[in-house]
Each structure stands twice: as structure tokens, then as C-alpha cells.
Amino acid sequence: MKRFAEILYAAVLLTVLSCSAVTASAQDREKEESKYASSFFKVGVKGGIDFISVNRFELGYISESVSNYTGFTAGVAFSFDLPVRGMTIQPELNYVSKGAFFRGENNVRFRTDYIELPVNIQAGLDLILFRPFIMVSPYIGCAVYKQPGTLPWDHLNRFEYGIGIGGGIDFWKMQLQVKYNWNIGGLVKNVSDSDLLRSVRKGNFRGLEVNLVFFF
């Protein structure tokens, strides 16, 4: 009888331990699934710094000295995981400041701020703790601010489009981006008597952009 009681006790204990293991395994699986589901779509805020230059500059027959412009980027990012492992599409809505310093007989600071919509297509490696990636970023934008204020909008091309190429790394809830952007098209659509407009009549912005994104 004592032997039977010991066997019964061992069987009950084994059953309880087995049920506990199955329950724990199911909970872990649910956590992993919920973690994956939550990471499928992420929203974040971003900020960064831009180092902008103008790719062509002339004033009549005399070339001017142009200094690079340090601008900023601020906006929001929306990240979607694609079915292919490591692939992500990340559209953003940003406020971007671009410009240049023209040095000649009259030093002029030229600045144009844009509302930009880039779509970052990222391909990376999921390495558990971090994810390095490369990306291609076509973008469009619309100018909403300019300096000097006396420049007429009628002579400026407010619509912009271009492409960026770069890379970055995801870690924790952060994403570091580094990319180089090329605006396509011209800054000026109608050349006027303005020396500044004539100086950039065939030019456009390009430059390096460094951003940090925080995902919620």
C-alpha cells in the first residue's frame, strides 16, 4: 500500500510538472507572437542634422565662393516590416532646412525649408540585439519657407524630388540613419534680375543627412 502511494504521488507530481511546462511554453510562444505582431508596425519621432551644398553656382561669368549650410531635420516615421525577413519600408513626414552661403561682393545667405515625404526601403540583417541595414530613399517635397524674404516665390521651384542612398542600424527602440541626398531638378524655374537667383539657376541641393529615430 505504501509503495502504491509513492507511485501515485510520483505520477501526480509528474503530471503537475508536465502541465506547468506546457503552460510556460505556451505563454512564451504567445509572448513571442505578440512581440512580433507589435514590431510589425512602429511609429517614431526623428531629429537630425544636415550638411547641405549646392551642386552648381555661377554669377554671370564669375564663380562665387559657396559655403556649405548646416540645417536640421525633424519629423515622424512609420515603420512596416515586409514579409521578406530583414526588409522594411519606412515612410516619413519631415520638416527639412536647406541652404547655402554665397560669398562675393555681397554675402548672401540662401535658405529654403521643405515639407518632405521620403519612403525609406531598407534591407538588413536581424541580429537579435541590433539590425544593420542599407536603404534607398526616394522623396518628394514642397518649399514652405525661404530666405531672403524678398525673393519672389514665382521664380523659385517650390516642388522638389530626389533620391537618397545610405544605411544605418536599429538597436533597442532607436534607429540611426546616415544617407546622402540628391535633389533632382532646379531651384529656380524663372531667372530674374536677382543676382542670387542667377547664381543658382542651374543648381540644386545635395548633402549628407544624419538622423536619430526613437520608436514608441
Image: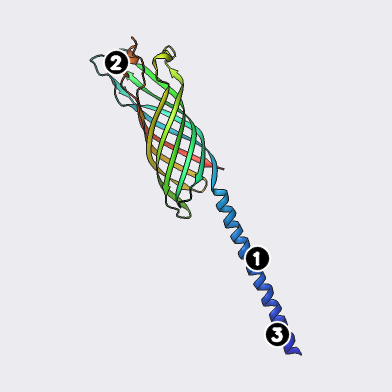
What is the CA distance from the residue labelled 1 to the residue labelled 2?
A: 76 Å
The amino acid beneath tag 1 is Thr
Residue 23 circle label: 1
Give the labeled residue for mark 2: 104
Q: Is residue 183 above or below residue 151?
A: below
Horizontal side of residue 198 vs 133, given as left or right: left
Residue in view at x 40 percent, y 17 percent? 156
Asked which quadrant contains residue 3, the reply is bottom right
- Who is closer to the viewer here, 78 or 129? 78
Residue in view at x 43 percent, y 30 percent? 140
Few, some or many C-alpha atoms within 10 Å of disc 1 (few <14, some 14-19, many ≥20)?
Answer: few
| Tally of numbered discs | 3
Q: Residue furthest left?
A: 61
Q: Is residue 105 above or below residue 139?
A: above
Mark 3 or 2, closer to the camera: 3
Q: Are marks 3 and 2 in contact (CB under 8 Å)?
A: no
What is the CA distance from the residue labelled 3 to the residue labelled 2?
A: 98 Å
- Who is closer to the viewer here, 81 or 42? 81
Q: Are marks 1 and 2 in contact (CB under 8 Å)?
A: no
Residue in view at x 48 percent, y 50 percent? 83
Residue in view at x 43 percent, y 15 percent? 153
Asked which quadrant contains residue 26, the reply is bottom right
Residue 7 circle label: 3
Mark 1 or 2, closer to the camera: 1
Residue 174: percent from left, percent from top: 50, 44
Horizontal side of residue 162 vs 90, given as left or right: left
Few, some or many C-alpha atoms within 10 Å of disc 2 (few <14, some 14-19, many ≥20)?
Answer: few
Q: Which circle's residue, 1 or 2, is located before the other in the chain?
A: 1
